[in-house]
Amino acid sequence: MIKKLAGIVGLAFMVVIMLASNVFSIVHLCDIQFNFDFTYILYLNTQNFEHPHADVTKNGSGLIVRTSGEHALQVATAAQVFSGEAMEFDAIWLDEALNTLNNRLNMSPVNSYTVGDIQIFNYFSSKLSTFVTVDGQRSNIQVAIREDRVVIGIPMILHSF
């Protein structure tokens, strides 16, 4: 009887851990493997950050930090806390980037619109920890396409494009 109870408790504990790890896992762009070159961008709410593989620009009360995709995880880990992130790359890789993101994040389209020569698409993923609400709709992935360049931002693009 005690062995059976211990087995049930152990199984229940494993199920709770699996559910918690799925619900509380926070996914960042730097965690996702892409098979093309891109620039990785972090938005920091601080005035102090240095890293040997990062180009840091002051932006109001915060910083915009740029690095290569190769150093994205290293720079994001050093920054620890950031308000958003983005990636910028050649439009030739758009389909591959969206497929990779959708496979990892299970994105749902929210809306799309055009501003001048920029096409903007907003998506939502429950696998991301942050979101913005616009017109009553939650969004946490923004894709902007201009001619031959693409920027993808989480929860949105926070720099000029």
Image: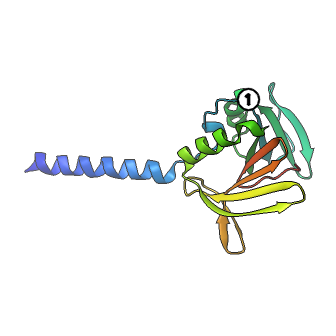
Figure label count = 1
Question: Where is residue 137 shown, x and y percent of the image?
Answer: 66, 70
Q: Is residue 141 visible?
A: yes
Residue 133 vertical position relative to residue 21 in the rendered view, above or below: below
Rendering quarter of residue 150: top right
Q: Can residue 26 be seen in this view?
A: no
Give the residue furthest to the left. Answer: 1
Q: What residue type is labelled 1?
A: Asp
11 horizontally vs 161: left or right: left
Q: Nearer the viewer, residue 82 or 126?
A: 126
125 horizontally vs 23: left or right: right
Residue that mark 1 sits on? 37
Q: What residue is drawn where x is 71% and y is 34%?
A: 78
Q: What residue is drawn where x is 59% and y is 41%?
A: 100
Q: Nearer the viewer, residue 85 or 76?
A: 85
Rendering quarter of residue 80: top right
Give the residue furthest to the top. Answer: 52
Question: Where is residue 25 shown, x and y percent of the image?
Answer: 52, 48
Q: Nearer the viewer, residue 87 or 27?
A: 87
Question: Where is residue 151 shown, x and y percent of the image?
Answer: 78, 45
Residue 147 vertical position relative to residue 155 in the rendered view, above or below: above
